[in-house]
Image (cartoon, rainbow, N blue to C red):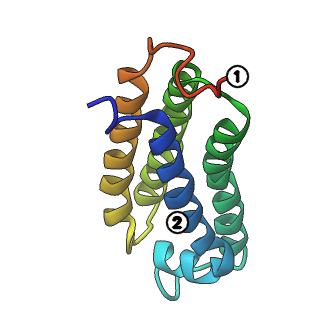
Amino acid sequence: MKKVFNPTVWLTVFVIVGTLGFLSGVFDPEAAATDTWGTGNVLEHDATYELALQFAFLAFPLMALFTLIFIPGRQVRARILTAITIGFLVLPISFVSVFLSNGAEGNGLEFWIPFTIILATLLFISGLRNWNADSRSNVPSSE
């Protein structure tokens, strides 16, 4: 089971999925605003807010990428993965909850909430399963 929940693998999955998901809103923030608030209900500044949110969400895959590049060791990566996951879970769900309680139509949001929860759960399990892993795992040999 430890191979399935290897933090290096899940950090990589998160970098790929997170970057692809969040960049879609960066390239077309007007469409993201229309999807969220509905046609005819989008204010001038909504696309700007959507763009800002996409960059805020992009911080999580970037943290994961820097962890992969600069942080050796399964245990340390697992602990960082757990911390990233908590933030990743709280931020999108809180934004969507606020949006839906303030008149957002939620087109597509019904998909992203369960997807976010499933991905975050898998990331969190990976972090917890490797929390006390041998700190020398995944560290290149000096020989």
Where is residue 99 shown, x and y percent of the image? 48, 58
Is 143 on the left-hand or right-hand side of 88? right
Viewer-closest of 77 and 125? 77
User: Measured along the vertical axis of the image, is residue 105 above or below residue 14?
Assistant: below
- Residue lying farthest to the left in this orientation: 1
The quarter in which the C terminus is drawn is top right
Q: Is residue 87 above or below residue 34?
A: above
In the rendering, at what x and y percent does residue 128 appear?
38, 22
Where does the image place residue 37, in percent across and percent down from the top left? 49, 74
Give me the disc on residue 21: 2
Name which of mark 1 and mark 2 comes first in the sequence.
2
**Secondary structure under the numbered disc 2 in the rendered image:** helix
Nearer the observer, 105 or 9: 9
Read off the residue under disc 1: 143
- At 41% from the left and 34% from the top, the residue drawn is 6
Q: Is residue 34 above or below residue 97?
A: below
Query: Badge 1 local density, few (<14 within 10 Å), some, or many (20+)?
Result: few
Residue 71 appears left or right of 95: right
Does the residue at mark 1 contact the one at mark 2 (Cβ under 8 Å)?
no
Residue 7 in picture, x, y percent from top left: 47, 34
Q: Amino acid at mark 1?
A: Glu
- Residue 67 image label: none
